[in-house]
Image (cartoon, helix red, strand yellow):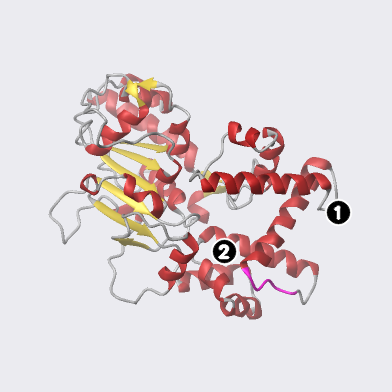
Amino acid sequence: SKGKVAVCRDELKSHLQQKFSRVFEGGAKAGDSAPLNQIYTELYITEGGASEVNQEHEVRLMESASRRAAAPEKTITCEDMFKPRPHSPQPIRAVLTVGVAGVGKTVLTQKFSLDWAEGETNQELQLLFPFTFRELNVLRDTQFSLVQLLQHFFSPSKDLCSFTQLQVLFIFDGLDECRLPLDFSRTRVLTDPTESVSVDVLLVNLIRGSLLPSALLWITTRPAAANQIPAECVSMVTEVRGFTDLQKELYFRKRFTDDTIISHIKSVRSLYIMSFIPIFCWILSTVLQKLLEQTEEPELPRTLTQMYVHFLVLQAKVKNIKYHQGSGADLHWTPETRDMVLSLSKLAFEQLQKGNLIFYQSDLSECGLDAEEAARYSRSAHTGL
């Protein structure tokens, strides 16, 4: 009934406001968060993008992106993602948004969800359900109907048994992290939202449009995984391009008054290229600020390796102070720290060779890592290096 939908909508909005109004920024300590509306920076998003598979290393993708000709591009804003396009009469049903790691795809979906929940934009949507593939992976061996899946993640939907007449948006963030077998050629057709099946069958049929054909979908991914979704299932591809040169400048000027620092960043090609990624800007700013605190004329990093080593040292110090009651002056490369860094390096290398971008407890055990100890490093440096 309309009354149930209205109640569900209000409760869902309240739930999403609570979930997304504050987010963890960069390497904030566990428990610290910042208002999303306060820290959010508009991203440069374009229509069109490489939805086909691209095996090129992401750093090379970044370099080629930085050299793109200044041809006119169709830009799009977060709030207009599902608005009808003036050059296309077809309604937008499914949007695939691509972008390299750390460029802001997840925060973009969170901002979209928060704006809807606060009544700012896209109020024609009656219900909005944001998922991450990371949380769906955990349900790989569990059977749900679509109705049960929504009730599992979103308690406000518990009194709704049908969504067929509603304007609903499903957001699926992080396709590149998906460990579900999405097989669009062999998965059977499913049209009943109350029938229990595996989660991958639900997803395939939602994306196909067999299940809830009136629903809208938004999927985000790194470029290399984009080809998992058949082109015929996608209405529009968008690309999150991160910061423009002007936005880079604005970002750094908020943090540094010394033109020498900004000139240094601009003079080091690899640092400047990578600065189109918001999380990289934060890491670089953190490193430079710490170096400036230590000495008036520090030797600034000139390579990505130097910068990441500085950042690793900072995180080792944070962990030593936070979990072992040490001081910033203590030796940060203890034998334990050295062993942990080597084990984490092995874990990252082996999992990337397998094509996995996230790790689970069984993966940690295979590399001889204790889950709790590894989690401490994660909490100290959860920026995803």
Report the residue that reaches farthest toward the left.
Answer: 89
Tell which tag, 1 or 2, sits nearer the viewer.
1
Residue nearest the observer in this picture, 227 or 136: 227
Q: Which residue is mark 1?
A: 331
Give the side of residue 266 with respect to residue 45, left or right: right
Query: Could you classify mark 2 by the number of other residues whose Cα lies within 10 Å: few (under 14), some (14-19), or many (20 or more)?
Result: many
User: Who comes first in sequence, dot 1 or dot 2?
Assistant: 2
Asked whether residue 33 is in view, the answer is no
Q: Position of residue 377 (x, y in %)?
A: 69, 44
Q: Which residue is mark 2?
A: 281
Give the side of residue 27 with respect to residue 7, left or right: right
Q: Amino acid at mark 2?
A: Cys
* Secondary structure under the numbered disc 1 in the rendered image: loop
Judge whether residue 76 is colored magenta: no
Residue nearest the observer in this picture, 55 or 278: 55
Look at the image and give the residue range highlighted in magenta.
Answer: 299-303
Q: Position of residue 117 (x, y in %)?
A: 38, 41
Mark 1 to mark 2 CA distance (whole Å) = 27 Å
Instruction: Name the residue rendered at 39%, 36% in the picture.
Output: 13
